[in-house]
Image: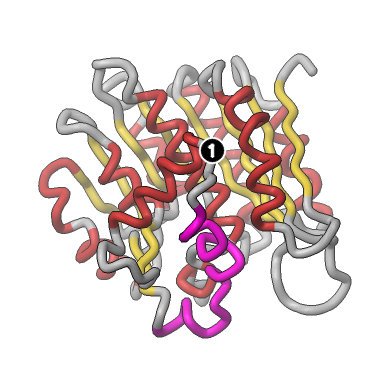
Amino acid sequence: MLSYRHAFHAGNHADLFKHFVLTRLLSHLNQKDKPYWFIDTHAGAGCYQLDSGYAAKNAEFQGGIGRLWTREDLPPVLAGYVALVRALNDDGELRFYPGSPVIALEMLRRTDRLRLFELHNSDFPLLEANLAGAGRRAMLFHEDGFAGLKGLLPPTASRALTLIDPSYEQKDDYTRVVSCLREALKRFATGVYMVWRPILDRDEARELPLQLEQLSAKSWLHVSLTVAHRRDEGPGMTGSGLFIINPPWTLHDELQSTLPFLRDALAVDDGAGYEITRDGE
């Protein structure tokens, strides 16, 4: 049931896209003094070694963070994300990639808190080790994040960013994302939520953003990035999407100006592209 290991895909184009946008959301939350929580329903191991083990097997990071690693012409908002990755590799060699928990740990302020869920028996001890430096700022839960999220809402801090990014290895992950968010919005309608999704030729994958649009959210932004034409055969995911509920109003323009660069930098063929839609359009 829990055979999926995110380390195989660490630092690939989908990870890069997700984590770049995550840094923008955290940056916007940091602009106000009031503390907030970062909640991750599927935290994984927190940090990944790229030059050995699972990540080195297919080396998917070479088509993601590997393409931006040495570039000096990055747009400013993208440069901030790459700087976080470079800080983890202070010897100049790309050997480690931060997952969302470590990115959040680096960006959250002293008064902010992390609440992280991971169910996988192998990844949870790694998450504990990688978050050891967070001390009492972080609470880690070895349990199902879909089920556990409702127990944290509304947060005592009254502000929160929740990342929901299951593997979608289980078909019911699609329906669980929708039901989880529906319940979360009932408990905490003003929270910021970001859902990651794969772009796949499957009915449930195509229907997910449409179902998310129908939730009772005050505002939303849906953005997707593809790096190649969809493949009929062979492994590999050619694109991913992010559905963001209650996004900062400046995020649309930030992405609109940055995604052309990201599309070109990560393109595998002329099927690379991006799309941004928001409520009211």
What percent of the width, then of the height, locates residue 122?
Answer: 34, 75
State the residue at coordinates (11%, 44%): 136
What percent of the width, then of the height, locates residue 148?
Answer: 38, 45
Query: Where is 186 relative to 274, above or below?
Result: above
What percent of the width, then of the height, locates residue 85?
Answer: 37, 55
Query: Where is 71 relative to 58, above or below?
Result: above
Q: In the image, which residues are magenta?
A: 52-71
Query: Where is 151 relative to 98, above or below?
Result: above
Query: Where is 9 relative to 22, above or below?
Result: below
**Residue 83 visible to the viewer:** yes
State the residue at coordinates (46%, 33%): 24
Quarter of the image for residue 115 reads top left
**Residue 70 covered by magenta stretch:** yes
Helix, strand or loop at mark 1: loop
Which SS does the magenta portion mostly show? helix
Q: How many marks?
A: 1
**Residue 180 visible to the viewer:** no
* Residue occupying the far left of the picture: 135
Q: Is residue 253 left or right of residue 231?
A: left
Quadrant where the image shows the C terminus:
top right
Q: Camera-side residue: 212 or 27?
A: 27
Bin the neighbour count of mark 1 within 10 Å (Cα to Cα): few under 14, some 14-19, many 20 and up: few
Quarter of the image for residue 265 reads bottom right
State the residue at coordinates (60%, 15%): 218
| Pointer 1 residue | 75
Q: Is residue 206 left or right of residue 72?
A: right
**Residue 97 covered by magenta stretch:** no
Q: Camera-side residue: 136 or 178?
A: 136
